[in-house]
Amino acid sequence: MNPVDTVLRFLDRINERDADRLAELMTEDHAFIDSLGQTIRGREKMRAGWRGYYAMSPDYWVSHEEISRMANRWLSSERRAERSPEPSGGPRQPGLQWCRTIW
């Protein structure tokens, strides 16, 4: 599988909301770095993390706009959306976020 296919497969699996199928694409020492710079290491920690995230945000989805090479890494420009909790405890509000992911 080439790198672009790998990125697309990850995005598809994220949208399936199936943490087990998503974890099949991860290596045992998989590393995830979030937008705050915190790193989570390991397939099983990520599987548990995605399960929790899907439970918290069951309508989460991601789509790509562009995938490009950046040195020895791949960069995808993405849109992510979910309903985020209202701080007051009221109904969840829709949100859309643009981001870049380095693979």
Image: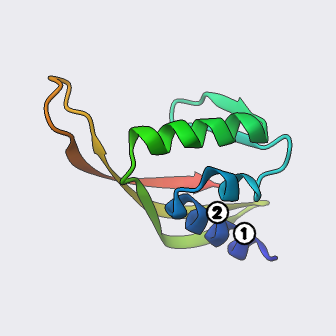
Residue 73 in picture, x, y percent from top left: 73, 59
Label 1 sits on a secondary structure element that is helix
At 72% from the left edge and 69% from the top edge, which residue is drawn? 6
Please, is residue 85 above or below residue 54 in the view? above
Q: Which residue is mark 2?
A: 10
Please, is residue 17 above or below residue 56 in the view? below
Label 1 sits on what residue type? Thr
Instruction: Say left or right for 52 vs 43.
Output: left
Label 2 sits on what residue type? Phe
Residue 103 seen: no
Label 2 sits on a secondary structure element that is helix
Q: Which residue is mark 1?
A: 6
Quadrant in which residue 71 is drawn: bottom right
**Separation (CA) of disc 1 from disc 2:** 6 Å
At 39% from the left edge and 49% from the top edge, which residue is drawn? 58
Q: Are marks 1 and 2 in contact (CB under 8 Å)?
A: yes
Quadrant assignment for the N terminus: bottom right
Quadrant in which residue 86 is drawn: top left
Residue 59 in picture, x, y percent from top left: 36, 54
Residue 36 seen: yes
